[in-house]
Amino acid sequence: KKITAFTHQHHEMLGDLIRKYLELKSILAKQRAEDIVDEGVPEEEVEEVKAEAKEAEEEYQEYSGHYQKMEEEEPPIPISDDDQKRLKSLYRKASMLCHPDRVAEEQKSEAAKMFKRLQKAYRENDLNEVEAIYNALKTGATLGDRAMSLSELEQLQSAVTELKVNVDGLRSELSDLMTSDIWVTLTDAKDWDAYFSDKKSQLEKQISEMELQLEELGI
C-alpha cells in the first residue's frame, strides 16, 4: 500500500515533467542521429547514436503508456489511522476466506475474482467495499459451501500443498520487489515532500536546458 501511495504521488507531482523530459530527450536524440550521418564519423559511432535515439523514443512511448494508465487509475481514498488499521484487519480476514490457495479446486475461479476485487478495494482504501466483501464471505453469500466437495481436512491439506509449491515463487517476487528501483527509492526517500520538491527542481532545470538546445537547433 505504501508503494501504491508513493506511485500515485510520484505521478501527481512529477508525471507531467517526466513525460516532457523524455519527449525532449527523444527529439534531441533523433536530431543527433540525423545530423551525425553527414559528419563523416565512423559507421560504428553512427549506429550507436541511432540505437540511442531508438532507445530514447521507446522510453518515451513506454512512459507515455504508463502515464495514461496512471491518469485512469483512482488514487487511494484518504482515511484515518484507525480506519487504516480496521481496513488491514478486515483485508486479512477476508483474504483467509477467498484466497485461491485456500479453497476447493472447483471454487478457485470464483475465489480468484473475489480476491482480485478485494485487493483492488484494499489498494484504494475502500473500507466500505472491503467490509462488504468480508461480510459476504463470512456469511457464505459467495463461494458456496466450502466443505461441499472436500472435507475441512482435505481442504487444509490441499491448501498446504499448494502453498508449499508457491513459496519459492513468492520469495522470488519479494526479492524482485526489494531490489526494484521504486522500492529502493521509497526506502531512501524518508521525507517525501523534500524528495519530490528536489526531483521537480532537477527536472525543470533539465527541461529548460533541453528546450534551449532545441531553440538553438531551430526546432
Image: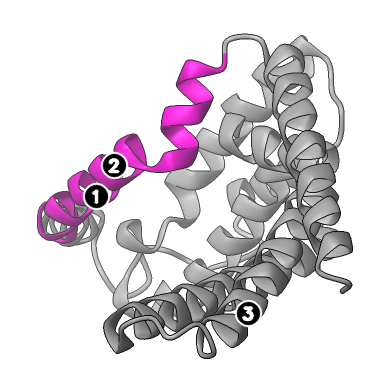
Q: Amino acid at mark 2?
A: Leu
Contact flag, marks 3 and 1 (Cβ < 8 Å):
no
Q: If you read the primary sequence from the N terminus, does the residue marked by circle 3 or circle 1 appear first?
A: 3
**CA gap, disc 3 and disc 2:** 38 Å
Callout 2 environment at 10 Å: few (<14), some (14 to 19), or many (20+)?
few
**CA gap, disc 1 and disc 2:** 6 Å
Residue at numbered disc 3: 30
**Which type of secondary structure does the marked residue at label 3 adopt?**
helix
Closest to the observer: 31 or 140?
31
* Residue drawn at x 46%, y 72% as measured from the top left: 52
Q: Is residue 14 above or below residue 210?
A: above
Q: Amino acid at mark 3?
A: Lys
Contact flag, marks 1 and 2 (Cβ < 8 Å):
yes
- The part of the chain drawn in magenta is 162-189
**CA gap, disc 3 and disc 1:** 42 Å
Q: Amino acid at mark 1?
A: Leu
| x, y percent for residue 216 | 84, 61
Q: Let me know if residue 185 is in the magenta part.
A: yes
Callout 3 environment at 10 Å: few (<14), some (14 to 19), or many (20+)?
some
Among the 4 quarters of the image, the one containing residue 43: bottom left
Residue positioned most to the front: 40
